Image (cartoon, rainbow, N blue to C red):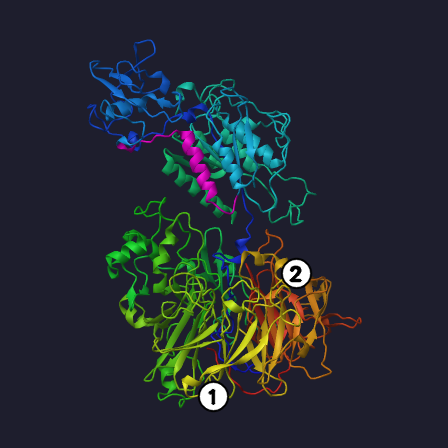
Amino acid sequence: MSMLLKPIYGLQLFVILGMSVDAIAASWALSNAPLPVSTTVKPNVMLLVDNSGSMDNIIYDADFFALVDSSDPNSGVIDRSSQQQWQYYNSSGSWSNVSNTAGNYYKSSFKQGSCSSNYDRFRNASTTSITKCLKLPDPVGSGDTRYSGEYVNYLLNRFASGTDLSTGASGNIPNETRMMVAKAVGADVVDNTAGMRFGVARFYGPSGHSYGHGATIDQVCGSSISSIKSSLSGYSADTNTPLSEALYEITRYFRGLSSYYHSSTSYSSPIQYRCQKNFTLAITDGFPTRDSNFPSNDPDVPAGQTLTDWDGLHPATSSSDYPSFPQYSDGYDSNGTGEGATLYLDDIAKFAWDTDFKKNASENDLSGVGYNDAAFPVQNMYTYTVGFATQNQMLEDAAEYGNGKYYTASNAAQLSTVLKNALADITKKSGSSSSAAASTGRIQTGSSVYQARYNSSNWSGEFLSFEIDTTVGSTYGQVKTTGSATNGAVFDAGKKIPAWNSRVIVTNKAAGIAFDWSQFSAAEKTSYFNGQEAMLQYLRGRNVSDTAYDVSIYRDRVTNLGDIVHSTPYFVGAPAARYSDSFESVAYSSFVTTHKNRDKILYVGANDGMLHAFEALTGVEKMAFIPGSLLPNLKELSDPNYSHQYYVDGSPTVVDAFDGTAWKTVLVGGLNKGGQGIYALDITDPSAYSESNAASLFMWEFTDEDDVDLGYSYSRPKIVKLQDGKWYAVFGNGYNNTEADGYASSSGNAVIYIVDLWDKTNVIKISTGVGTSDDPTNASRPNGFSTLTPVDLNGDQVADYVYGGDLFGNVWKFNLNDVDPTKWKLDYKLYSACSADPCTKTTGGTVSNAQPITTAVTVGKSKSGIGQMVYFGTGQYIEVTDNNGALGGRQTFYGIHDKGANVTGRSQLLQQTITIEASVNVTDTKGTVSTVDDVVNSYPLRETSNNYATTAKKGWFLDMVPPAGERGERLISIPAIRGKRLLFVTNIPANDPCSPGGDSWLMSLDAFTGGRLNQTYDLDKDGKFGTGDKVFGPTGNPVVASGIKVGSGGNAPSFMPGADSDQVIISGNDQLETMRIDEGDDVNRQSWQQITR
């Protein structure tokens, strides 16, 4: 997050920023999900497929399930329990009844009699003179296809004599068996579901049609998809149904035990990580048979307890209860072999959930961490069940005990749907982060810090408000967690969104409109909402629990606020810029007076398709805006099998600007991976927010349809006044502008846009001329800019130059210092970042050493007063492979002295190094005299070198490499200047997938030299900076630390200024961290205002 700060005095120039902190950028193979959770450990999923003989039953026609009474055999609608009964002509030349309530018949049981070849003869059991000849499907062949009696009666009641049903064409009845469908659908679902380690098992049958026990695991979890599909294709329906035995055998596999049913088989557990989830998904069409063989000496069953009564429940049951057995029943005959005689599946599912599969305290997972880790103390198994052409209580009980879900299906389409739904739920079970923003730049009672977070298990968002301690003393600036909301927050705005039909939601087509059904054409309704008004209402926030919704069509949500990943919130209160009244033709002070009491609003983008405006004091949503370019993609949010996408993932920028006649408050924002567009809104008066006022709120949207060199809008726009007297939105072209979407760039060049704030058709574009043909890896990737940095060198609040870093590691300077826009131009390339001299391209045996730049640069004063210092770090965190630190290459932080010419390489820079990285114990005195009650805190700290140049240098650099070697450390957030102090947060991706986000370090260096400072962190928390804060040194003399580890996923720092020190606030994946730092000596301190744009 960011915050609106009081004016900052010191080294920083008139850097015209959108905010003090920008969001992470991304490029190339842009991820559709947050990278900290994209390495979620793949779950183990064992498919247990019923291969009992009944799986050769024909699939029923959908109309077979109609429950309509009828005595007319030709009506086409029937009651299954009392439909007209028929008889079939048998092999003895006589007639046998086709039962409505019991019986399974092989197709070969029915004989031709006087019917034509391949047709079977039947007669009405009541009126025997009525006969029919039907040609029934036999997909198994040789008459081995099975039919239930009631289904044969259904077909005879529905179809006329002489009908050929064998092709499936007549009435489109199914012409396939349950086994065929299970194999085909199973293979298709496995083939089209990524991110899971599938295995497949079946019931054991030692030889065709023989009785067996337990399961055969044909493919272990993690097998190739082709191997799983091959095994499925070979399944045939020829065993009994030892359902609970099979599930028990699977638990032995997950535990790494030997098989109980196969003497020569031993298993290796597929569990790789302590946080890995494990699942069995059982597909069956009936009740168990011959399913009672279990060991009495299982190592995880305590004395006095049995597997078959694990839940301790065994309600009285008799055979007459078939097929509606009571809940939690264990069957009616423990020695029986018939259907339902034993019902132990729920007990085994509960055993699998209750049992820790990895109990060995000395065993480590693949990350080298023990399976008894307190964060993940148990490795167990979920059980999901699918009743295929059957419904029974046992399957429902097993899913309940196994913490899974129970589904039913009767045909291929239904089975495909329920399997996809089950795997989507598994994905959810197998699955927070923006920088901190203070609500005011002044420290006063009621100051707040806001944190946006996301939950990757359901892609919901939280927007939390915390109080900040303003008590003078050792606790000053610390975050309070005494509120009643999540994590001690004062409120969670995600839970304060109004009802769907009372929200103010606006969008745009050619102009701003209400997000209302009446505002869209018939074609748009079909394209955007599948023609369903209910979908639009869902997108407005109508709950799935409403009777208007089918949960198989609409995704259930825990909150109407979507995940907030990279969007940095922006606080807007009373106008607070420091424009003089002569700055424009209308006095700014009048605008301030008019709006001094306007509502305090927080603006933040979310991946629910909306920019949200929340009241800062209450958290209630005031308004939401959907960029029109996202309308075609919104319906994906309703999909029950939703896979994460980005929508309004970019950060807004807000500035008071002059339109030629009046002052207005304007918000501009991008979408990051959400889309290729920039939008602008007039947010001057929040009291005027209404859907009827949408046209006045919306200003414009600029997309790749306006210019094809615009890529995904990762460049956060800045609003500036330029030398021609006009106000502009300035932004880079973002990433992947060559994407084949009908508006692709032909060059892939990195360009900047300067768009008239009041007329988007007035656009100036300046290109670097560096694009796909210049890719240092020779892979022809497009080039692109992240966020740009406009600067004002003379303090007149008008931008003179713009700096920007591109994906190929180049830092560019653009000259806008002319009243004639036609003379605005690319000035020069300031520096090319490479991990060594000289820079190389990938060619032959040479690998490129270019270092990508994916954040905005920071510009400050030089020590000599000549030129500027330009600060930036390198590295990317944009592709899933970036989570592997070993693949990140050496990355560097630079301070380049811009004196009007290109700096050619590292040889012209002063090198600093990380000399020590270690954990150090520091006594926390809490501002009092040390006592025996003091707490000793252990801090992971860094010391850096303090080298000085002996010859003239043009800046400095620090490779992000500690003494132990490279770990993929990189910079993915914007550095900040406080006095002569430079602060930045680095990121090291996690090598442990159970601890997403990796590590982050807050570094504090001398802005001029990159070396160690004299004072830094208040480690002993005494409110002062002294010897208690010094820790280690190369000569044994204590020195201050240059870096401190701040947890995982740390973002750019925000500051709560104090009298002689600042409180730094860092937001990580799931926490806010604070640390007091010395404000430092301001060099050439002047009363300069930082212009926040």
Q: Which residue is mark 1?
A: 796
- Looking at the image, the residue that sits furthest to the front is 844
Query: Which x, y percent locates residue 49?
Result: 48, 32
Tag 2 secondary structure: loop
Whether residue 55 appears in this view of the structure is yes
Q: Is residue 425 above or below residue 346?
A: below
Q: Rounded to the nearest whole Å, what is the CA distance between mark 1 and mark 2?
A: 44 Å
Q: Nearer the viewer, residue 694 or 711?
A: 711
Q: How dense is the environment of label 1, judged by Cα within 10 Å: few (below 14), some, or many (20 and up)? A: few
Is-magenta flag for residue 82? no
- Image quadrant of residue 1074? bottom right
User: Going by the image, does 27 lie left or right of 133?
Assistant: right
Q: Earlier in the sequence, mark 1 or mark 2?
A: 1
- Looking at the image, the residue that sits furthest to the right is 1035
Query: Which x, y percent locates residue 460?
Result: 44, 55
Residue type beneath disc 2: Arg
Per the rendering, the mark at residue 967 is: 2
Q: Nearer the viewer, residue 73 or 1012?
A: 73
Whether residue 386 appears in this view of the structure is no
Q: Nearer the viewer, residue 991 or 450?
A: 991
- Image quadrant of residue 250? top right
Tag 1 secondary structure: loop
Residue type beneath disc 1: Asp
User: Going by the image, does 1028 lie left or right of 707?
Assistant: right
Q: Is residue 40 above or below residue 220?
A: below
Q: How dense is the environment of label 2, judged by Cα within 10 Å: few (below 14), some, or many (20 and up)? A: many
Q: Is residue 586 above or below residue 656?
A: below
Is-magenta flag for residue 195? yes
Give the magenta range.
Answer: 171-196
Q: Main secondary structure of the magenta part?
A: helix
